[in-house]
Amino acid sequence: MNNMWKKAGLALTSLLLGAAVLSGCGSGEAKAPKDYDFYIFNAKTENADALAEVVKKYEQENGLKIKVFSLGTTDSAETLRSEMNSSHKPAIFSTNIGGVAEWSESKAIMDLNQATNPELKALADKIPDSMRLSMDGSQNYGIPYNIEGYGLIIDTRMVDGLFGSEHTAAFLDDFKAATYDEFESFVTAVDDYIQSDKPGSVTLNGHTYKFAGEKTALTKELTGVFAEAGAEKWTYGDHMGNMALNAIFDSPVAAKNATEEQVDELQSPVEKVVQTLDLYSQHAAGMNGPAKRGPDYINSTTASYDVSVQLFASGKALLLKQGNWVYPNIAKLNTDILPYLTFLPIKLPLEQSDIKVPGLTVEKFNRSVPEFVPSYYAINTKVTKREQDLAQQFLVWLNTSEEGRKAIVNDFEFIPYNADAGVKFDNTLNNSLIAYKVAGDTLSNPFNGSPAGGSYWGQEVFGTILQENYLNSPKAWTQEDYRDIAKQSVQGWKDAMY
């Protein structure tokens, strides 16, 4: 195991032991009897109300009293740590790949391979390897809350306007199958059409699409191809950094346990990501015309996440690189667009020699979208056996019963990690992710296993290098720039390993 993770785990264990000793010296209040059968600590703020309602139904059906605590903030680590070391510990708690080391080292998390409830064990066994919560791949520490994913979001009515509605379905299929070179030519041709009404055609997957002779009311509004958020390092550092990592690692666990040799292999994929970001930033949309690299490109008032969503929702940009979590934000700005949203895959100019994941081809990579688990339900082994048993029964009910699964989809509005083609949402982006999942065209989220936890490498290393030294300047990028950015980013990963 990576030395950094060992050291972090031991340090956290020491802190936990210290906290436990201190809490043992507390007052009589700490020893107050529990007035519930078991306790759920929920760190997913967006399903707080819905989870409370579902638990009420479960209580009524089973004659139980369940304590539910949902945070009003996404910063849950300290609060959870305090609860886990109190005399009233949660039986079910939220965690992810960034927190599993702490709870594994302190032996406070159940490996579901050893679950005493056979139904829960069977449920856990069906979690795909790439989605398992683990330290080294041998454990299975949690049941996924849901899956999320991201890609290039498009309003299909724009495709109608660009090429004719009779070609839209074929266009979407051909875009998914297209090569990077075809994608690059497509971006250039669309931007020429936007900026100068230049007629012409594009070729995707070997099929040619001619631009409409006249622009429609929608396509007249376009100012660029991409809605970019240069002020937000996570939108390119995490998202695009993760694309590079998928060429080398098939899961967060694999990235978390990376060897130095594997990290060195990131050099070429990161170069290819930078090349792609160069293309995006050369064809970005602004409110009143194209957006150009420079100070405004990284300014929080002109290039924030909110501005990028507004650019897309108002029809200024053809493509928005974001996840299904953006749907409510788009809905606040333009409800008309919602039925027409879908995901297209992010493409990279990879060669087969760049890819080290067994069985993954360039073609499959470029027709796939990343889908991953943001948070897991874990069971606390430090509570009583009865509480553990009740916790296992609840998770089985939530994820297998008709009422529980209906709550996940309709009330939580989450995509179940085991969703099939029969699961349908009003949310078109969720439906698009399910279609990719059913087709088997998905990548993972290895960036969550990068050193120092998730977003550190993506934002503070890769993202910072890009933002501070390249996106803030109008100068053209060269192949040497691609190599230098990648070299610095790879070294930043290695520096954080030890």
Image: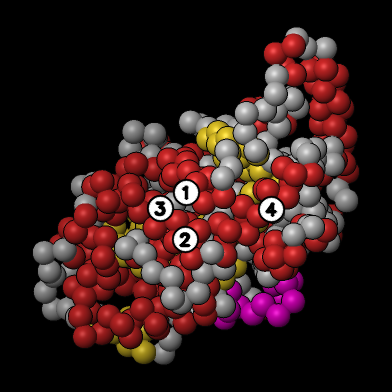
Kind of residue at badge 3: Asp
Q: What's drawn in magenta, residue-wise?
A: 353-371
Image coords of residue 189 (percent x, y): 31, 72
Q: Which residue is mark 4?
A: 392
Image coords of residue 491 (percent x, y): 75, 47
Q: Earlier in the sequence, mark 3 or mark 2?
A: 2
Which residue is pictured at 13% across the width and 70% down the height? 215
How many residues crowd mark 2 within 10 Å: few (<14), some (14–19), many (20+)? some
Kind of residue at badge 1: Lys
Q: Are marks 1 and 2 in contact (CB under 8 Å)?
A: yes
Q: Earlier in the sequence, mark 1 or mark 2?
A: 1
Q: Earlier in the sequence, mark 3 or mark 1?
A: 1
Q: Secondary structure at mark 3?
A: helix
Which residue is pictured at 54% across the width and 64% down the height? 401
Gap in Å between the C-alphas at discs 3 and 1? 13 Å
Q: Secondary structure at mark 1?
A: helix
Q: Is residue 360 magenta?
A: yes
Q: Which residue is mark 2?
A: 403
